[in-house]
Image (cartoon, rainbow, N blue to C red):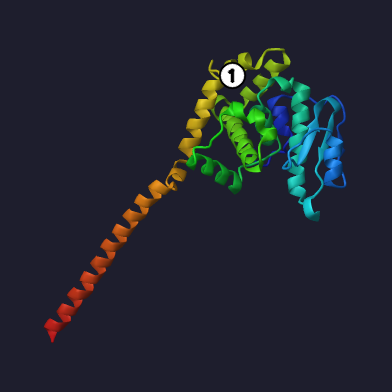
């Protein structure tokens, strides 16, 4: 499935074509980008989708640097938002699901930076509860990166625990007019999203147990053990040398 064309994933989850064309804008500079958006976007935003207008605005390259792979990912991410809104009323879904699924559909994979962001949050006890992601647009860059990373992990965990069919069932249920709580309970073994949030927290801690070793209080004891072992090895080496010298002296 890794080499599957990105938007074939969409049709596996919820087969449906977009109802009309999407307009895509790439302004010449940041000033035009924020002016065209006509909304208070955070400084870290790279693009924005307007599902009602079927419009996507992509932020122009920063400092003249253009990375086509990054632009492709951002474009597919924003198109996914439009597709999801076209399929179901995404105003009624938690932002973690909207953003996490858009990342999943755009072909986004977990990067080293994502792992570092999550592990740092584990170490500092700074993981977000999923309802907090709804406030993402007022977050600074570091906290926004954590919110995106956790959202992607949440969707991946949902698929892992309930299967890919759960995504299509969720979208179909929303499209039929059911509320989020009802539909989520149906696809997630009768549990609510509060239980899912707890499951996600537990899953992250299990996956990033190694990060806990990097805490200062643990690091002290780890270093102490390493020093004791190194000291023991050095003493053994020294004792062997002394024994060899004694053996040489006896031969003389």
Residue 193, compared with residue 38, is above or below; it is above
Q: Secondary structure at mark 1?
A: helix
Q: Left or right: where does residue 124 sit relative to residue 250?
A: right
Q: Can residue 65 be seen here?
A: no
Of 211 and 127, the residue lying toward us? 127
Q: Can residue 215 be seen here?
A: yes
What is the x, y in percent for residue 177?
72, 12
Q: Quarter-wise, where is residue 14 in the image?
A: top right
Q: Left or right: where does residue 33 sit relative to residue 183?
A: right
Q: Left or right: where does residue 119 sit relative to residue 250?
A: right
Total labels: the figure holds 1
Q: Left or right: where does residue 193 sit relative to residue 71?
A: left
Residue 149, compared with residue 167, is above or below; it is below
Q: Quadrant of the C terminus?
A: bottom left
What is the x, y in percent for residue 165?
63, 24
Label 1: few (<14), some (14–19) or many (≥20) C-alpha neighbours in 10 Å? many
Determine the residue positioned at 44% across, 43% down.
Answer: 212
Q: Residue furthest bottom?
A: 252
Q: Which residue is mark 1?
A: 187
What is the x, y in percent for residue 1?
64, 37
């Amino acid at each position: 499935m890794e080499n599957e064309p990105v938007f074939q994933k969409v049709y596996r989850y919820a087969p449906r074509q977009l109802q009309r064309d999407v307009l895509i804008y790439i302004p010449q500079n940041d000033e035009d980008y924020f002016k065209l958006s006509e909304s208070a976007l955070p400084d870290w935003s790279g693009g924005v989708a307007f599902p009602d207008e079927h419009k996507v605005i992509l932020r122009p390259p920063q400092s003249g640097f253009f990375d086509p792979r990054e632009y492709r990912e951002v474009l597919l991410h924003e198109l996914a938002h439009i597709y999801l809104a076209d399929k179901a009323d995404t105003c009624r879904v938690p932002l973690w699901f909207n953003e996490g699924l858009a990342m999943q559909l755009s072909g986004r994979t977990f990067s080293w930076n994502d792992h570092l962001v999550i592990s740092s949050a584990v170490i500092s006890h700074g993981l977000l509860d999923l309802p907090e992601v709804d406030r993402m647009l007022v977050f600074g860059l570091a906290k926004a990166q954590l919110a995106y990373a956790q959202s992607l992990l949440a969707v991946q965990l949902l698929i892992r625990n309930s299967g890919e069919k759960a995504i299509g069932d969720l979208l179909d249920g929303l499209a039929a007019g059911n509320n989020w709580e009802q539909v989520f309970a149906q696809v997630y073994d009768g549990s609510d999203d509060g239980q899912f949030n707890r499951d996600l927290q537990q899953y992250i801690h299990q996956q990033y147990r190694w990060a806990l070793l990097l805490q200062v209080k643990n690091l002290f004891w780890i270093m102490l053990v390493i020093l004791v072992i190194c000291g023991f090895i050095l003493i053994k080496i020294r004792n062997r040398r002394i024994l060899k010298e004694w053996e040489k002296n006896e031969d003389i």
